[in-house]
Amino acid sequence: MPNKPFAITLKPGTSLANLTGTWRTARPVYLDRLPPCNNACPAGENIQGWLFHAESGDYEQAWRVLTESNPLPAVMGRVCYHPCEGACNRGQLDSAVGINSVERFLGDEAIKQDWKFDAPDAASGKKVLVVGAGPSGLSAAYHLARMGHQVEIHEAGPLAGGMMRFGIPKYRLPRVVLDAEVQRIVDLGVTLKLNTKVENIEQSMKQHGFDAAFLAVGAHIGKRAFIPSGDAAHIIDAVSVLRSMEGEDKPMLGRKVIVYGGGNTAIDVARTVKRMGAEPIVVYRRTRDKAPAHDFEIEEALQEGVMIKWLSTIKQADAGKITVEKMQLDDKGYPQPTGEFETLEADSVVLALGQDVDLSLLEGVSGLEIVDGTVQVSSNMMTGHPGIFAGGDMVPSERTVTVAVGHGKKAAHNINAWLNDATYEPAPKHELAGFDKLNPWYYSDADKTVRPMLDIIRRQTSFDEVQGGLDESNALFEARRCLSCGNCFECDNCYGVCPDNAVIKLGPGKRFEFNYDYCKGCGMCATECPCGAIKMVAEET
């Protein structure tokens, strides 16, 4: 029998072993870096985690990973302004992954397949009051219920959803979608009491035996502005207009409608009254690039025939007309009056100048601090009164559905800890997986799949949903565009390029490990890792 080659006869631990790892000055280590999409998500979703299951075609598991953080994916897939996509590394390669599109697909699939949340393991015996059935309240109730607490939501309105229902038009968020996701939370065991306004939070807690409370009252009070006006002038706030769209009696605004403001609410109102057959004109005192409304919302409004008068402010409102003064920007970018005036026909003026929160339920509660109409909370979302937490529109923050959902999740973790005489400590974040950590040449070019839009005629005349969703093939393609930034996806690249055979495959789903006896620390694996999941560290001396 022929002798084996000499190199194969060498055995670790013998005098003949060539342990090349002893030459090393630096060693490679596998690590998980934080994907920029996860880092940018206000709701704290594990985006890369659920995209992994989606690109494998396991949509239910993807939905379950997604809903570990956010119980409203079909809603969020429609109304979130997707900061995750703005942070996506793929945007520097061709275009960002359509994360929001895939999220909507998973949310819609869950409704279609009637997927349910898993029931909590055991009851805690604790009782929590949630005030408000908007996105923050629903999110908190969901997470608290999954932790085993008995949760009651007290909602002053006749329907759940808060500003998702009364502030977002149906053409952006169909009510059947909202109702389905709310019902799934109720089915988890959450008690929802409608038409139940909390007049005093301390009294409600004592009367019903609640151990803690989360305040999530939305900003439903429209801000007013002093506009000199005649007795016959019809001036109404934007929130009232949008709220009345949910009832049988639609607002009587007339044919010529002036919308005063430049935020998303102003654009929503203008697009709404356009669908009602009116002729809206948005009046805003600054330029388009300074408008707080998202640019794509403005663009869609212009496509639908909404007129916008930039650098304009209302000086007088009378029956059937308004007087507008033209403005100009000074050296610091602030609008200044010019003394030039214009008269516009106006049957009504809708004020879209922001919203306030009704804080009357907090009167007489000790320890609370209110600044500029918002409740001050500590890092654990608790107010100055023990056991009373707050989030969403009630606290200083950006007022979006995604931020509100994130507040509900964060508050639930802290309420759970407080009820157990503990402190919630979130897991430390990994270092960020920047684009400079990737090797983008390993990935194929694949342009983003654009969601279909309703034709312009139907957009102008109906409340049908403006933007369509992806079908399964498109959603699967879009999910597979994910670069898996900072996290090993077992591409075998390190295994293939290692000149010392020092990379050991551990099996599907188990990734790899290094055999440091033979790793010389050449760094080839780290250099060639597509997703930046290997790092070279100095060898300890």
Image: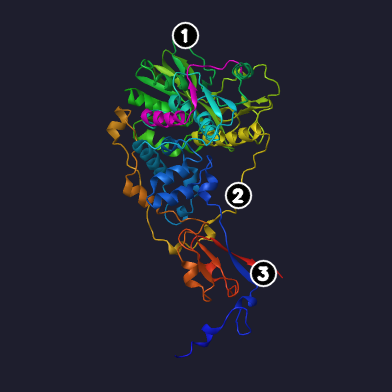
Alpha carbon distance from label 3 to label 2: 24 Å
Q: SS for tag 1?
A: loop
Disc number lying in front (3 or 1): 3
Amino acid type for the residue under numbered disc 1: Asp
Q: Residue at x 42, y 50 (%)?
A: 53
Examine the structure image and report whether residue 187 is included in the region drawn in magenta.
Answer: yes
What number is the disc on residue 366?
A: none
Q: Is residue 218 visible?
A: no
Alpha carbon distance from label 3 to label 1: 82 Å
Residue bearing the label numbered 1: 231
Disc number lying in front (1 or 2): 2
Examine the structure image and report whether residue 185 is included in the region drawn in magenta.
Answer: yes
Image x and y of residue 82, in percent: 47, 42
Residue bearing the label numbered 2: 429
Image x and y of residue 132, in percent: 52, 24
Question: Front-most of 32 and 524?
Answer: 32
Earlier along the polypeptide chain: callout 3 or callout 1?
1
Residue bearing the label numbered 3: 539
Side of 36 where 307 appears, left or right: left
